[in-house]
Amino acid sequence: CKAAEKNKVRIAPTCAETFLAHRYDRRPDQIARDTQAVVSKFSKLPAFFGYVLVDEVPAGEIQHIEHIRQSLEQADPAHPALVVTMPGDTHAALKKSRLPILTVDCYPFFAPGDPNGPHTTESSQAYYRYVTGRLNRWAFEGNRAPWIMPGCFVDTWGPWYYDEKMHVVNETGAYCHWRQPTPSEVRWQVWQALVAGMKGIVFYVNLPTVNDRKPGEPAPPIPEGASLPLLREDTPTHQANALLYSDGRPTEQMLELARAYAEIEPWKTTLLRLRRS
């Protein structure tokens, strides 16, 4: 947080390790104790923005998350509580909570030929426009701030490894679910989010998945019974697996994101004031 303060960045740390336990232990006194512990740990830190409670909370648990949010608001009204929802669970977050920010993850760039999502440029962009547009409508109806979490990563099931450049290589028999967007697609996600009225843009993910596996070594199995398009040959992606390499070096996607954010910075106050009519 001190480094963030020095660089004029605000931090929203995850509290999931504390609050996920309440899926099984929902006693109000336990929530109160854990709330006090989390507030004592974070609320006075420099550059602290708010509490991230859980990632991709299902619709059926949002009402319980609202109890935690209320507890945090009572203990620390100066800092908001946040969750990330998948697109299908977001309306429940609007109706069953008073979360001040609706944060939705939307990863539009599925791998070529993937039957589980839009996998052409046109369909991927249409999906992203649909999710951000709908989020803006819902946020306006509920007087919330709409934030979007775009994607910048590779998601492969089965055998894969990093080459000497820390680029992902998918091996024969692997299923590639999401592909890494190009730098121009990263930039497009930022500007399209602004067009749709988003008030926050938080990319997933900064650091790559840890994978020390070598070519040909055993890999986690793909779930049985899944009808997925498996690769018939080893396929280098020539892409990193996040915005940064594991040693902290920026990828081309990260550099493009930095350029986009720098262009937006002078207009930040105006963009935050704009409201849907």
Image (cartoon, grey):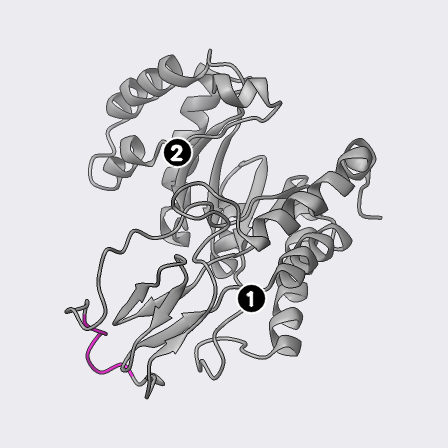
Q: Residue furthest bottom?
A: 232
Q: Position of residue 41 (x, y in %)?
A: 36, 16
Of 197 and 152, which appears nearest the observer? Answer: 152
Q: Residues within 10 Å of mark 2 (few under 14, many from 20)?
A: some
Mark linked to residue 14? 2
Q: Residues within 10 Å of mark 1 (few under 14, many from 20)?
A: many
The residue to which callout 1 is attached is: 108
Of 233 and 165, which appears nearest the observer? Answer: 165
Res. 129 image quadrant: bottom right
Asked if residue 224 lies in the magenta stretch, the reply is yes
Q: Residue furthest front?
A: 164
- What residue do we see at 43% from left, 57% from top? 241
Question: CA–CA distance between discs 2 and 1?
Answer: 24 Å
Res. 118 image quadrant: bottom right
Q: Position of residue 124 (x, y in %)?
A: 60, 72
Q: Amino acid at mark 2?
A: Thr
Q: Is residue 86 above or below residue 275?
A: below
Of 7 and 91, which appears nearest the observer? Answer: 7
Q: Is residue 216 above or below residue 205?
A: below
Q: Amino acid at mark 1?
A: Pro
In the figure, is residue 102 to the left or right of 34? Answer: right
- Residue 149 seen from this side: no
Quick one: SS at disc 2? loop
* First to last magenta residue range: 221-226
Quick one: SS at disc 1? loop
Q: Position of residue 123 (x, y in %)?
A: 62, 77
Q: Is residue 65 above or below residue 85?
A: above
Q: Position of residue 227 (x, y in %)?
A: 30, 85
Q: Residue furthest left?
A: 218
In the figure, is residue 276 to the left or right of 146? Answer: right
- Could you tell which of marks 2 and 1 lies nearer the N-terminus? 2
